[in-house]
Amino acid sequence: MIAFVRGMIEEISEDNVIIDTGGIGYNIKISGGTAAALPGIGQEVKLYTYTCVREDAFLLYGFLTRDDLEIFKKLITVNGIGPRGGLSILSVMSADDLRFAIISGDSKAIAKAPGIGAKTASRVILDLKDKISLEDTLIKKEMNGYTGSLNGIDSESSARNEAVEALVALGYSPSDALKAVKKVEVSDETDTETILKQALKNMF
């Protein structure tokens, strides 16, 4: 169908953007994270799109990166997670943080998304944990130039993720790093260094 849309931004709202492509305005559904990262009205943008065809509607869902689009497509394969639910999750988590939440079994982080309850969050983890690897996630972060908490991404999750990355860089296996970090009790104020020190103690 439509792989991407490139054009000038005509209007932006919290969950929707209108892109003018030479006189035709495309109405595209977006996440809150995407809305916050878009350039201003009148600026050019390229959105990778997912096309949803229903009996009563033809809808486009847009993402700034192919990575976001791919994780969205995985999300909507989960029973109970439609396109709206997928956007809701990506409004409170980056694609990278979502992968780490799935790998580490952090259903509470996923359940923070509006309209996503604990049971649905657990189902996301159960259905997708075998489709995502930590090694792949770390590579994607490096390629994307990941720099930490952005667009409302939970700072606690980001600190955990950075601690896992640091342990892997020190030579520990991804699974052992995840287990050690998961044992550490943290709050929004806990920084990466503190988590890392405690996680290293858990290694022994």
Image (cartoon, rainbow, N blue to C red):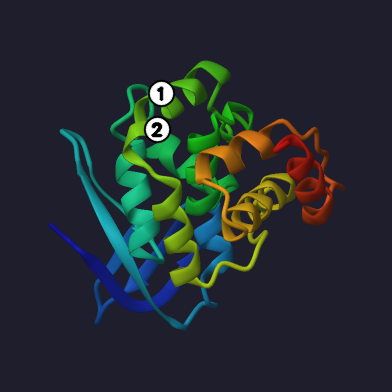
Q: Quadrant of the C terminus?
A: top right
In the rendered image, residue 131, in percent from the top left (x then y), is placed at 32, 38
In the rendered image, residue 39, in percent from the top left (x then y), is placed at 53, 77
Residue ranking furthest to the front: 204
For mark 1, give the secondary structure.
helix
Question: Could you tell me how far apart the alpha carbons at marks 2 and 1 are, in whole angstroms?
Answer: 6 Å
For mark 2, give the secondary structure.
helix
Residue 146 appears in view: yes
Label 2–label 1 contact, CB within 8 A: yes
Quadrant housing residue 75: top left
Which residue has dot 1 on it?
Answer: 126
Q: Residue at x 43, y 52 (%)?
A: 135
Above or below residue 172? Residue 88 is: above
- Going by the image, does 121 lie left or right of 156? left
In the rendered image, residue 81, in percent from the top left (x then y), is placed at 38, 29
Q: Residue at x 78, y 46 (%)?
A: 195
Residue 29 appears in view: no
Q: Residue at x 32, y 78 (%)?
A: 7
Residue ranking furthest to the right: 189
Q: Amino acid at mark 2?
A: Lys
Which residue has dot 2 on it?
Answer: 129
Q: Count the numbered circles shown.
A: 2
Q: Amino acid at mark 1?
A: Leu
Q: Residue at x 67, y 53 (%)?
A: 152
Quadrant housing residue 198: top right
